[in-house]
Structure formats: C-alpha cells, structure tokens
Image: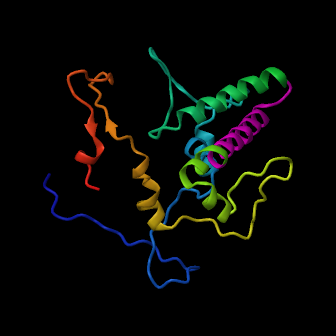
Amino acid sequence: FNVTCLSFVRTLECTTCDSDRRQQSNGATATLDASIVYGADDERASILRTNDGTGRMIANYTEEGELLPTGDDPNDIFWEHNRIATRLKIFNPHWDDERLYQESRKINIAQLQSITYGEYLPYLLGPSLMEQFNLTVLPGSEGTQYDSSVRLGMWNEFATAVFRLHSMVAKKVGALGLEFRTCTRTPNYSARATWAS
C-alpha cells in the first residue's frame, strides 16, 4: 500500500475530569434515546427526515423494497417510527410534519426503553442486579423516576469490552453466500472454535 507512517492523534484532554489519565471521547449519546436511528444531534436528524408532512424518516427504495439509509442495523426501530407516524397522521390529519415526527419519535423511544428495561435487561442481568441498581420497571403511573443529577456517560471499559456481550452470541454461527442466502455446503461454525476467547 506504500504507507510508511500512520497518523495517530491523541485524545483531547477532558478539562472537567478528575483523572490524570486520558480517556477516549465518544460522540454517541449514553442515553437510551434511539440515536442510532434518529442521529446524535439535530443536524444528523434533519438529514434523515422526509420533511413532506408525514413525519416519516427517509427510506431508500430498490426492486427489493425499502432500504434503511444507514450503516448500522436499527431497522426494526426505524420501521416502527414510520409505522407510528403513518398511524398518527390518519388519526390526527391536522398535525404538521414536526409534530408527527416528534410524537412518533417519543412513542418509539418509549417502546425501546420499555423493551430494554422490561424485557432485555432482566434476562441479561437477573432480578437481583436489576433491583440492586434500581433498574426494575415499576408498574402503574409512578414509573421509574429519572434522576437528572446522575452524570451520563459510558466507561471505556464497558464500551470496548463488556458491551460486546460475547456470552449472548449463538453457539453456532451460520454462513451466508454472496446472495446472502444460507450456504448448504458450508456447515455452521462453532463460535468457540473460530473466535479467540
């Protein structure tokens, strides 16, 4: 490749941190706000919107159907936003694009949080850790209270190692061909045999 030198830039110093060690900065939000779909800031969010009075987000169309305009895989959350926006438009034809978008976004994020805290985390962490860290979703109108004094952020150790959740990977991993169809000639691979763990 004729590359003799790679440019590595140090992480900017955190002026509000107590530590004397530098930590990598992460531009993604640490809140469960569906930013993987909506973008982490207003500029990115505006690029992803149709702005056509429907409150929907942009989808690319091909002969195979709609495709999501992103490199990540938040398809279900994306489709749910557009489904909610379509339904809200039917029931509230007087709402403008901004209101349809924001209300759909609020409902979609609430559903994501409900699934995460009500179904996924209890399975992953178990009831004792859910209770110990006050993560249990409470029934009724009281709900779980948001504490604005808690500093939002993500530890590097969590983002780079723990959050990978390798224990959640299936024991057997299948192979897909160039057409993204399951290869019948290729057996399923054992995750343990193929990954250094």
Most common SS among magenta residues: helix
> What is the count of numbered marks?
0
Which residue appears at 59% of the width and 79% of the height?
16
Quadrant location of the C terminus in the rendered image = bottom left
Nearer the observer, 53 or 179 = 179
Q: Is 77 colored magenta in this rendering?
A: no
Q: Is residue 125 something that shows in the picture?
A: yes
Nearer the observer, 25 or 49 = 25
Which residue appears at 85% of the width and 53% of the height?
142
Residue located farthest toward the left when viewing the structure as drawn? 2
Q: Is residue 133 something that shows in the picture?
A: no
Q: Is 64 drawn above or below residue 70 in the view shown? A: above
Nearer the observer, 145 or 140 = 140
Which residue appears at 26% of the width and 49% of the height?
195
Q: Position of residue 95 (x, y in %)?
A: 83, 30
Which residue appears at 77% of the width and 56% of the height?
144
Q: Position of residue 46 (x, y in %)?
A: 63, 41
What stretch of residues is rendered in magenta? 94-117
Rendered image quadrant of residue 2: bottom left
Q: Position of residue 103 (x, y in %)?
A: 77, 37
